[in-house]
Amino acid sequence: MEALAWLCAQAILELFIAMYIADLVSGLVHLTFDNCVVANVELRNQVFYTPKEAAEFMATSEIFKKATGFDKFLWDFQNHHEAPFPATKSHFGMWLEIFTFEIPVFIILFGVLYFDLAPGWVVRPVIMAFALGSFMQVIHFNAHIRNRDLPLSPITRLLQDTGFLLHPSFHRKHHETFDCNYCLFNGWASPIVERVARYCRTVGIHSDTPPTHFYRSERVGVVLEGGNAPIGSLLGSSKEDVPCDEKCEQTVTSDSTIDSSDGQTFFPPVAPNH
Ligand SMILES: [Zn+2]
Ligand SMILES: [Zn+2]
């Protein structure tokens, strides 16, 4: 009986460690790719306010096809800030996409465990972290679903409210500023990720202005001055941008401007050419 209690306690402890690792990895990966700049100027000036439109652009546009693999990946990754919802895949599809990518990692980790190449108490939480990580996009989009008051299971709501899964308010903040709250599993590792983010900005690895603000200012420059405006002089204006989640729910009223909820005029980027 005592042995069983010890096993349960160990399993719970390892599960908590796995959740922390999953959150930490999600935060560091998100921090890294949110702060890489899409080098292809033409590509980064393409913006779509629905994931469906973005998917069509990726499938059909010559601009996208001619871009480097890394730029394609970054553009797709960062366009979530402009078109956060709804997902183009089902929950199962989102899970399967990450799980498929993780299969080689699982093979290696189970090999390490089987051949006793590392202590089990180290390998098991890592395996669990990857297993939990395969649900990352599902957990992430559940936060977006709740931010829109759409139906969500009571269990998911409870897990969000108790901090075991990503809380919608925590993630909403990321979509307002793009420079904090990078964690996508539950936010437990956020204090560490925020310190890493601050360090990266301090030493110049990342710029003070998140690329999403930079692109938006760049697009304003394209609209206002035919693409010749110095970007630096426009960066400040991006601070006043409408939060992405709100903006994406607005209707484009003309080809040239979108009226934001606070009365400002937001200049849209270069029109998508698809
Ligand atoms: Zn982001
Ligand atoms: Zn999001």
Image (cartoon, rainbow, N blue to C red):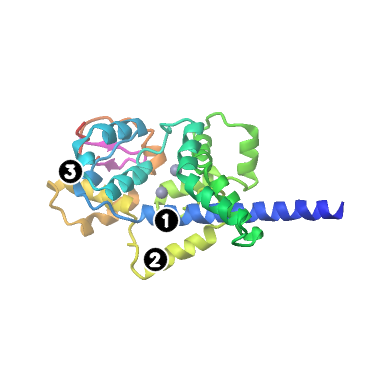
Label 1 secondary element: helix
Residue in view at x 39 percent, y 56 percent = 32
Quadrant of res 117: bottom right
- Classify 206 as above or below 168: below
Is label 1 in contact with label 3 (beta carbons under 8 Å)? no
Residue in view at x 38 percent, y 42 percent = 80
Where residue 124 appears, as percent x and y from the top left, is 63, 54
Q: CA distance from mark 1 to mark 3?
A: 29 Å
Quick check: which quadrant has ligand 2?
top left
Q: CA distance from mark 2 to mark 3?
A: 31 Å
Residue in view at x 34 percent, y 49 percent = 240
**Residue 17 got which mark?**
none
Picture mark count = 3
**Which residue has dot 3 on it?**
223
Report crowding for label 1: few under 14, some 14 to 19, many 20 or more residues within 10 A (C-alpha): many
**Residue 31 got which mark?**
1
Residue most extreme to the front: 115
Q: CA distance from mark 2 to mark 1?
A: 10 Å
Main secondary structure along the magenta-highlighted residues? loop
**Which residue has dot 2 on it?**
200
